[in-house]
């Protein structure tokens, strides 16, 4: 969002300032499962969509909602107003049809149901430095969320949605030739292990997470028919060591915590791997100049909302911590969009 020339223009100010309108239109469409329904029955008229979604607003409101989604590129439309028929775009059909394995709407469902409201308190978060979610009045995020099975499932599905592309890219691009075993710490539904086992047939993987998450991971593993090479381990990384492996991964884990806990977790990873082993953090690593990766910076503020003390970081920060812990060298592997794998070798 850097200024391109010396002439002031209100364009990006207004685009960002009204950004929550666009965001809420997409999140509402996901909540209504519009893309799932249109995948089943493409080419629907607005009136039929209105009836299908049980909307009591005016026809004009429905046209506006659907045409806004069309201008964003999320629907395709032939005709106009009364004669219009709507279908999914290529992207929404692939990624937002809940019946397809490529569905990534879990994160958007959680954005709508939790984060949209919590982000309304960003000012309060900045003023107080306190989380603005279920843990606002005490407790920690994970015990608050995991006490409610619906929220537990929604959270784990959201993690799958946001990291799927990165896990696929990492599983294919990282050099696994020297390694045989991997532990994914805070592995949620086990997706990283499953992607690695799929693309690297010589690898055996363990998804390590808190006990309430284990049955969800086991279900996913069975679904992928990879239970011979992907296992789960239930535990708490504050209480126990990281299960030993040649490669230890933490996807969106370090950013949940303050610097002291980040270092504690990196030390546990260091202790879990052999000489030559690798520790990998998969996150929206912020560029060293802190000028380009807007997603990483916003994710870092999302950690204020969600955990209070957590924050995202640059590769330079990662290098400093890796050196402190005793790793020999580091590397960075860009994954999808704003995310990368920061790698430290022992
Ligand atoms: C932000 S999610 C990231 C999930 C996944 N790695 C990813 O990249 O999408 C954090 C994960 O850490 C797990 N976690 C939180 N505290 C933990 C603890 N004390 N011990 C083990 N896992 C923990 C959570 O259950 C959750 O699955």
Image (cartoon, helix red, strand yellow):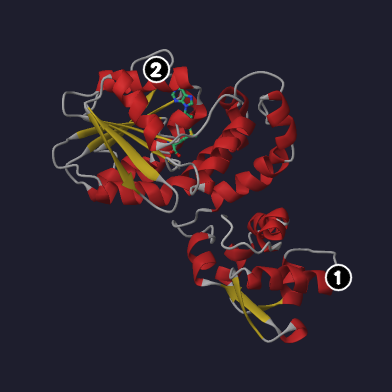
Q: Which residue is farthest left?
A: 178
Q: Secondary structure at mark 1?
A: loop
Name the residue located 85 percent from the left edge and 65 percent from the top edge.
57
Q: Which mark is residue 67?
A: none
* Disc 1 target residue: 58
Which numbered disc flags the more N-terminal residue, 1 or 2? 1
Q: Position of residue 148 (x, y in %)?
A: 63, 30
Q: CA distance from mark 1 to mark 2?
A: 56 Å
Indicate the position of residue 64 as horizontal and vertical percent values: 76, 71
Query: Which residue is painted at 59% across and 33% down in the image?
Result: 149
Q: Nearer the viewer, residue 111 or 266?
A: 266
Residue at image point 61% right, 36% down: 151
Q: Residue 183, located in which quarter of the rendered image?
A: top left
Compared with 48, 324 (above or below) is above
Mark 1 crowdedness (10 Å alpha carbons): few <14, some 14-19, many ≥20: few
- Which residue is under mark 2? 264
Determine whether 153 is above or below 137 in the image: below
Q: Which image quarter holds the N terminus? A: bottom right
**Residue at mark 1: C-beta within 8 A of ligand 1:** no
Mark in the foreground, 1 or 2: 2
Image quarter of residue 197? top left
The C terminus: image quadrant: top left
Question: Is residue 37 in sight in this rendering?
Answer: yes
On the image, the x and y values in percent for residue 233 come to: 35, 25
Residue 118 x, y percent position in the rendering: 70, 37
């Amino acid at each position: 969002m850097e200024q391109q020339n010396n002439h002031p223009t209100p364009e990006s100010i207004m685009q960002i300032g009204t950004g929550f309108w666009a965001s809420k239109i997409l999140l509402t469409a996901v909540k209504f499962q519009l893309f799932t329904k249109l995948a089943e029955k493409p080419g629907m008229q607005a009136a039929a969509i209105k009836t299908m979604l049980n909307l009591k607003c005016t026809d004009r409101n429905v046209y506006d909602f659907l045409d806004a989604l069309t201008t964003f590129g999320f629907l395709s439309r032939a005709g106009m107003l009364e004669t219009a028929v709507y279908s999914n775009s290529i992207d929404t059909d692939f990624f937002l049809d809940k019946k397809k394995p490529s569905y990534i709407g879990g994160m958007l469902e959680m954005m709508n149901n939790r984060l949209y409201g919590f982000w309304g308190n960003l000012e309060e978060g900045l003023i107080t430095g306190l989380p603005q979610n279920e843990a606002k009045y005490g407790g920690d995020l994970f015990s608050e969320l995991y006490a409610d099975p619906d929220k537990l499932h929604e959270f784990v599905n959201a993690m799958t949605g946001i990291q799927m592309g990165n896990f696929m890219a990492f599983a294919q691009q990282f050099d696994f030739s020297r390694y045989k075993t991997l532990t994914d710490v805070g592995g949620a539904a086990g997706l990283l292990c499953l992607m690695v086992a799929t693309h690297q047939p010589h690898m055996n993987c363990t998804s390590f997470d808190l006990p309430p998450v284990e049955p969800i991971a086991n279900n996913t593993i069975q679904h992928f028919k990879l239970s011979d090479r992907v296992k789960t381990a239930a535990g708490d990384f504050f209480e126990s060591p990281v299960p030993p492996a040649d490669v230890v991964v933490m996807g969106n884990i370090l950013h949940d915590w303050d610097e002291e806990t980040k270092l504690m977790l990196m030390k546990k990873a260091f202790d879990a791997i052999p000489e030559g082993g690798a520790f990998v953090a998969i996150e929206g690593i912020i560029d060293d100049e802190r000028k380009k990766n807007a997603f990483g910076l916003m994710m870092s503020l999302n950690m204020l909302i969600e955990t209070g003390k957590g924050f995202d970081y640059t590769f330079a920060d990662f290098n400093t911590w890796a050196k402190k812990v005793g790793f020999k060298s580091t590397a960075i592997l860009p994954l999808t969009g704003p995310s990368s794998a920061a790698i430290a070798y022992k």
